[in-house]
Image (cartoon, rainbow, N blue to C red):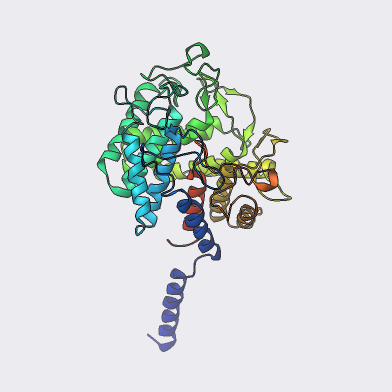
C-alpha cells in the first residue's frame, strides 16, 4: 500500500474514532443536572413513608408533608418506577435502590388484594381500604402496577417482581379484556365484577375513578396499558403479551387517533367515539408511546411512524403557544384552544416528543430541534422550580401559583423524570 493510501486509511480511522467519542450535546449535562437535583433528589428519600410503607404523596411548595397522604396504585407505581429507573442509571447512589425496594414491597404487600387479586385503586395512609376508594379497581391503575413491577424486575432481576407483573396481567386478562370488541373494560368492584352503570358504582358518581363516564372506554387507560404491556414484554417476551401489545397498538393508532392527528378521549364499549375536547399533552405523549411499542414489539411500519408524527404536528398546529412557548392543555380538534393552562406534565411530554421527532425527522421544515431547545428554555423559566425542586403544577406564564403544592396523588415524578431521562439519553451516550 502506498504511503498516501496508508495516510488516508489512518486519517479515516482517526476521524471515525473522533466521531465515536464526540462530545455529547451541550444541553445534556444541564438537563441531567435538572433530573438529578430537581426531580430525583427532591423525591428520594423524602417521600418514603417509613411508618406505614409506600410513599407519601402530599407535599406543599417547600416540600413539607401535608394532607391525608392516601396510597393510590397510580402514585405508588409511578414512584416505584422512577426509583427503579434511577437505580439503573446511578448505581453508586443507594438512595434509589432503597426507594425502589421500599415501593415494590408496598405494591406486593397492602396494595395487592390477597383475597381477590389485582391492585386496589386507593388505600388510606395506613394501607387499609378507605371510605373514598371502597375497594374498587381500575385498569388504568392495574396497568401502572404492571409497569412498575416490570421496571423493578429489570433493575434488580427480582423474580418476585416479574411474577407480580404477570399476576397483574393475568388479572386484567381474566376480568377486563373485551374479547368481542378488543381493548379492555376499565372499572371493577373488588371481586373483579365489571361496573357498567351509575347505580352499581360504589363511588356514587356517574364517573369512575379516573373521571370516565361509567361503562365507557377511555383513551387515557388504553395508552397507558400500551405503555405497561411494552414494559412487560421487554422483560417477559411472552406470545400472549405480544398479542395484546399489538392489539393495543392497533386500537390506539387506528381507533383512538383521528385521521387529522388528534385523539378522541372517550368511547362506548364498541369503540364509537364520544365527542369531547382534544388533550394536546396526550397527543404528544401517545406519539412517543406508539413508537416505543412498535420498536419493542417488532411492529414498526410507516403507518405507525406517520401517525406519531401527525399527533405531534397537530398538537403544535393547534395547541402550541407561538408567542411564549409551551403547550396549552386542551381544545377542539380543529381549534380553538379552550383551556389555556400549561400543566407541568404536558410540558414534559412535548419536550420528550420534540426531541424524538428531531431525531427521526432532522430535516423537517418545522425544525423540531429548534422547538425542543425553545421548550427547554421555556421550562427553565416557567415550569422548573430551581429553588425548591421539582416543577410548578401550572406554568408561571399561564397563571401558575409558585406556592401551589409540589406533589399530590396525581403529581408524581413520572412525567418529568421520564422526559428528562429520555432527553439525557437522546442527547449523548450514557
Tell me where residue 191 appears, x and y as whole percent.
36, 18
Return the x and y of residue 122 as percentages of the image width and height. Answer: 43, 28
Instruction: Using residue 261 as the reference point, say whether residue 234 is left or right of it.
Output: left
Residue for point 55% across, 66% down: 26
Residue extending farthest to the left is 159
Q: Quadrant of the C terminus?
A: bottom left
Relative to 412, 371 lies left or right: right
* Residue farthest toward the top in the current orientation of the protein: 199
Instruction: Answer whether residue 260 is visible to the viewer in this image.
Output: yes
Say above or below: 355 vs 234.
below
- Picture quadrant of residue 114: top left
Outermost residue toward the bottom in this view: 3
Quadrant where the N terminus is found in the figure: bottom left
Q: Can residue 247 be seen in this view?
A: no
Q: Residue at x 43, y 19 (%)?
A: 180
Percent across and percent down for residue 69 are 46, 35
Q: Which of 319 and 261 is in front in this view?
A: 319
Q: Is residue 423 above or below residue 112?
A: below
Amino acid at each position: 500500500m502506498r504511503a498516501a493510501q496508508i495516510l488516508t486509511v489512518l486519517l479515516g480511522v482517526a476521524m471515525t474514532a473522533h466521531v465515536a467519542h464526540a462530545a455529547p450535546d451541550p444541553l445534556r449535562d444541564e438537563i441531567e443536572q435538572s433530573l438529578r437535583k430537581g426531580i430525583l433528589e427532591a423525591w428520594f428519600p423524602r417521600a418514603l413513608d417509613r411508618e406505614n410503607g409506600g410513599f407519601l404523596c402530599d407535599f406543599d411548595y417547600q416540600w413539607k408533608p401535608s394532607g391525608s397522604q392516601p396510597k393510590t396504585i397510580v402514585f405508588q407505581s409511578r414512584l416505584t418506577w422512577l426509583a427503579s429507573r434511577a437505580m439503573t442509571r446511578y448505581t453508586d447512589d443507594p438512595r434509589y435502590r432503597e426507594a425502589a425496594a421500599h415501593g415494590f414491597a408496598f405494591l406486593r404487600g397492602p396494595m395487592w388484594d390477597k383475597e381477590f387479586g389485582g391492585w386496589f385503586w386507593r388505600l388510606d395512609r395506613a394501607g387499609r381500604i378507605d371510605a373514598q376508594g371502597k375497594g374498587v379497581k381500575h385498569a388504568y391503575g392495574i396497568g401502572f402496577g404492571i409497569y412498575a413491577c416490570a421496571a423493578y424486575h429489570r433493575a434488580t432481576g427480582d423474580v418476585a417482581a416479574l411474577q407480580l407483573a404477570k399476576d397483574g396481567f393475568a388479572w386484567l386478562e381474566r376480568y377486563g379484556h373485551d374479547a368481542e370488541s378488543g381493548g379492555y373494560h376499565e372499572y371493577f368492584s373488588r371481586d373483579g365484577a365489571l361496573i357498567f352503570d351509575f347505580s352499581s358504582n360504589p363511588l356514587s358518581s356517574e364517573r369512575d375513578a379516573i373521571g370516565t363516564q361509567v361503562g365507557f372506554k377511555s383513551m387515557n387507560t388504553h395508552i397507558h396499558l400500551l405503555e405497561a404491556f411494552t414494559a412487560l414484554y421487554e422483560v417477559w417476551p411472552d406470545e400472549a403479551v405480544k398479542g395484546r401489545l399489538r392489539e393495543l397498538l392497533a386500537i390506539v393508532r387506528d381507533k383512538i387517533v383521528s385521521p387529522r392527528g388528534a385523539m378522541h378521549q372517550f368511547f362506548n364499549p364498541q369503540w364509537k367515539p364520544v365527542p369531547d375536547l382534544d388533550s394536546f399533552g396526550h397527543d404528544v405523549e401517545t406519539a412517543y408511546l406508539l413508537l416505543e411499542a412498535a420498536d419493542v414489539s417488532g411492529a414498526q411500519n410507516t403507518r405507525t411512524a406517520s401517525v406519531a408524527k401527525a399527533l405531534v404536528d397537530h398538537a403544535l398546529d393547534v395547541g402550541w403557544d407561538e408567542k411564549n412557548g409551551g403547550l396549552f392543555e386542551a381544545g377542539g380538534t380543529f381549534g380553538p384552544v379552550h383551556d389555556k393552562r400549561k400543566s407541568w406534565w404536558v410540558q414534559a411530554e412535548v419536550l420528550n416528543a420534540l426531541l424524538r421527532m428531531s431525531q427521526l425527522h432532522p430535516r423537517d421544515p418545522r425544525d423540531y430541534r429548534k422547538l425542543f431547545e425553545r421548550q427547554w428554555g421555556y421550562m427553565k423559566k416557567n415550569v422548573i422550580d430551581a429553588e425548591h425542586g421539582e416543577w410548578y403544577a401550572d406554568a408561571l406564564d399561564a397563571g401558575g401559583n409558585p406556592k401551589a403544592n409540589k406533589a399530590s396523588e396525581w403529581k408524581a415524578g413520572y412525567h418529568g423524570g421520564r422526559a428528562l431521562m429520555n432527553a439525557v439519553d437522546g442527547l449523548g451516550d450514557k
